[in-house]
Amino acid sequence: MTTPASGSSRLSATEIEAHAEVFEKTRQARRTELVEDYVELIADLIEDTGEARQTEIAKRLGVSQPTVAKMLRRLAEDGLVLQRPYRGVFLTDEGHRLAAASRRRHEIVEAVLQRLGVDPDTARRDAEGIEHHVSEETLKAFERFLQNG
């Protein structure tokens, strides 16, 4: 607890450690959020049009092509995508697994929001941000909520 007069913290060492752990998990979720968005979009593009090209990824994400190129290099280094000159971007098996997991989380969160009365467009937009920060425990609770509703 912080007191207004002193401004000092009265948290125990255990509470401080727990607090730091929460912030570390949040930072990690933010780092993986962008990766998940890319692989999910690449999967969607391949499913919808048969290919995922750098120009289309940039257009859909509203970023520059150099930004996409940098991220695609990172995804390739992480073993999530394969790039073939003049042929676009392809997901590896690991990339497909990550895209599917991200899509599953999105669908569950979106369904819960709609069940709570959020209109479909807002639920879709909000789920896009929430999906990356939801733990497996919370997702399972959401699934139980949807099954019992």
Image (cartoon, rainbow, N blue to C red):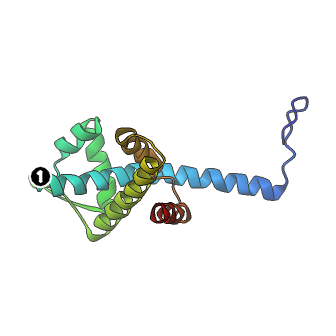
- Is 38 placed above or below 6 here? below
Q: Identify the residue at the far bottom of this view.
A: 93
Residue 105 or residue 56, whichever sits in front? 105
Q: Is residue 45 left or right of residue 110?
A: left
Q: Residue furthest front?
A: 149
Packing grade of label 1 (10 A; few <14, some 14-19, many >=20) is few
Nearest the viewer among 100 and 10 is: 100
Kindly indicate the quadrant of the structure image that contains residue 74: bottom left
Residue at 25% across, 67% down: 92
Question: Hey, which residue is sitting farthest right in the picture?
Answer: 5
Q: Position of residue 95 (x, y in %)?
A: 30, 64
Q: Where residue 5 sits in the image (x, y, percent)?
A: 91, 29
Residue underneath mark 1: 49
Corner quadrant of residue 141:
bottom right
- The residue shown at (84%, 49%) is 11
Left or right, residue 51 beside residue 79: left
Amino acid beneath label 1: Thr
Residue 83: where, in percent of width, then height?
A: 19, 58
Q: How many marks?
A: 1
Horizontal side of residue 14 vs 38, given as left or right: right
Q: Is residue 23 left or right of residue 142?
A: right
The answer to whether residue 78 shows anywhere in this view is no
Q: Is residue 94 visible?
A: yes
Res 13 → quadrant: bottom right
